[in-house]
Image (cartoon, rainbow, N blue to C red):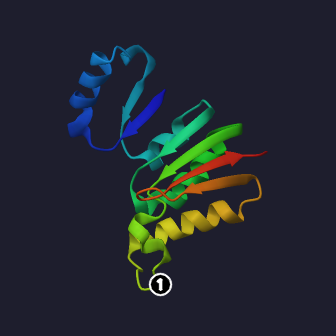
């Protein structure tokens, strides 16, 4: 498991709980900006979970599709953004980016998806080819 955390102040806490759960040997923690870190990953993945900076969701999607195996899944959190994505009056940077992410998923023929309308919305995306 590879995980990215942008906030270096959380590193000790994350490492503590990984050790407490006895999974430190299974998890590679990278501290940094996901947009800079993801391109350096040399592996491809069966599952990628996105819950980062909302204004960067479209870029995350582009990077993650390249790193995702065929038949693999992207699980994206907060895709309804407290209902703001359907409110035409909400045009802040984060809402606009999540709208763009959702449209990118819908318009990409190599992807299929299901949106779970629970809490802030979660989208499960499968790479078909």
Residue 2: x %, y % from top left: 47, 30
In front here: 115 or 96?
Answer: 115
112 with respect to 93 (left or right): right
Q: Is residue 69 above or below residue 27?
A: below
Residue depicted at 32% across the width and 18% down the height: 21
35 with respect to 125 (left or right): left
Q: Is residue 38 above or below residue 59?
A: above
Q: Hey, which quadrant is residue 94 in on the image?
A: bottom left
Q: Hey, which quadrant is residue 72 in on the image?
A: top right
Residue 120: x %, y % from top left: 42, 59
In front here: 51 or 61?
Answer: 51
Q: Is residue 55 above or below residue 13?
A: below
Quadrant location, the C terminus: top right
Residue at the farthest bottom position: 89
Query: Tag 1, which secondary structure?
Result: loop
Residue at the farthest front position: 118
Residue depicted at 58% across the width and 45% down the height: 74
Label 1: how many residues lie within 10 Å, few (<14), some (14-19) or many (20+)? few
Residue 105: x %, y % from top left: 64, 60
Residue ID for mark 1:
88
43 with respect to 70 (left or right): left
Residue depicted at 49% across the width and 60% down the height: 79
Residue 85: x %, y % from top left: 47, 72
Residue depicted at 43% across the width and 34% down the height: 3
């Amino acid at each position: 498991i590879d995980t990215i955390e942008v906030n270096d102040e959380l590193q000790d806490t994350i490492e503590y709980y990984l050790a407490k759960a006895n999974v430190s040997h299974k998890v590679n923690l990278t501290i940094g900006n996901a947009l800079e870190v993801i391109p350096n990953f040399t592996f491809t993945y069966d599952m990628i979970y996105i819950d980062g900076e909302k204004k960067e969701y479209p870029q995350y999607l582009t990077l993650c599709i390249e790193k995702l195996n065929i038949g693999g899944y992207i699980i994206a959190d907060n895709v309804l953004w407290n209902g703001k994505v359907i409110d035409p009056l909400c045009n802040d940077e984060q809402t606009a980016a999540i709208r763009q992410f959702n449209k990118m998923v819908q318009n990409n023929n190599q992807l299929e998806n299901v949106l779970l309308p629970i809490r802030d919305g979660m989208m499960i995306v499968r790479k078909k080819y």
